Image (cartoon, helix red, strand yellow):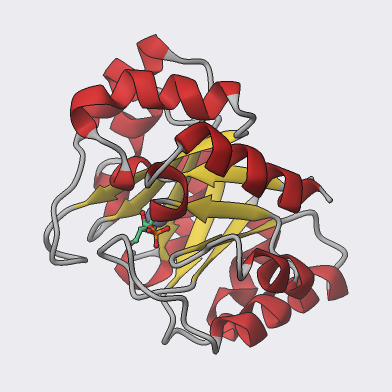
Amino acid sequence: MNILSPSILAADCARLGEQIDLVRRAGAGYLHIDIMDGMFVPAISFGMCVVSSLRKATDMVFDVHLMVEDPIRYVDEFAAGGADIITVHLEACRDVGQTLDRIRSLGKRVGLSIKPATPVSEAAPYLDRIDMLLVMTVEPGFGGQKYIRASTGRIREARRLIEDRGLDVDVEVDGGITKDNLREVLEAGANVIVAGSAVFSGDISQNVQRMTELIQS
Ligand code: DX5
Ligand code: ZN
């Protein structure tokens, strides 16, 4: 199934509840929540209380993207706070397998992410223990960047690896996705589409409706 996951990094934080309601009503499936620690990436974004407060305000699926060094330290807290999918970066884990197993043991869906410079093959050993592979399509850390064209081949490679092994793993893309390159990433094999600025600038409901139509067509 193809799903749109609006990234609240681009939302107006003073009107977060209202804007989340708009994306839900317009048909978005997931809500992408970027957690940045100022170490794995230079910026600092949301903390735990944002996730737990939002959890009380909506029943959307929380797609939590941890851009955090040694993320196993925090997965229990995010699970308890209401995350549904917890994605960690392969490059940030001291022990990737142990981190993924910890997320699984908490009853959450398991995501693994790779930065643009990390070979897709490095994720191969973990494909049978994850639910989603996040192929970053910009350097993680900031919203509003331009899609890296070389990502298209990486998405294709990820999808091929998953299919060759007969696995049921989602391929998520994150960074620089707009109405104009949506078709390209879908055709390459992505099925969970993160979009920040393309959703939250201008008319939010209309952006979600248009992107959802394209994703489902
Ligand atoms: C970047 C974040 C993204 C970001 C995407 O490090 O992981 O989720 O919000 O923003 P856009 O869609 O504006 O590139
Ligand atoms: Zn993200």
Q: Residue at x 59, y 54 (%)?
A: 193
Residue 8 occupies which quadrant of the picture? top left
Q: Quadrant of ligand 2?
A: bottom left
Residue found at x 45% / y 84%:
118
Between residues 46 and 211, which one lies in front from this camera angle? Answer: 211
| Quadrant of the drawing holding the N terminus | top right
**Could you say where residue 212 lies in the image, as x and y percent from the top left?**
68, 43
Residue 202 screen position, x and y as percent: 40, 44
Q: Residue at x 55, y 47 (%)?
A: 110
Residue 56 or residue 102, whichever sits in front: 56
Q: Nearer the viewer, residue 213 or 84?
A: 213
Q: Residue at x 40, y 74 (%)?
A: 138
Position above or below: 92 against 81: below
- In the rendered view, tell whether residue 53 sits above or below residue 108: above
Q: Is residue 137 left or right of residue 123?
A: left
Residue 49 in sight here: no
Image coordinates of residue 173 in percent, x first then y, are 55, 63
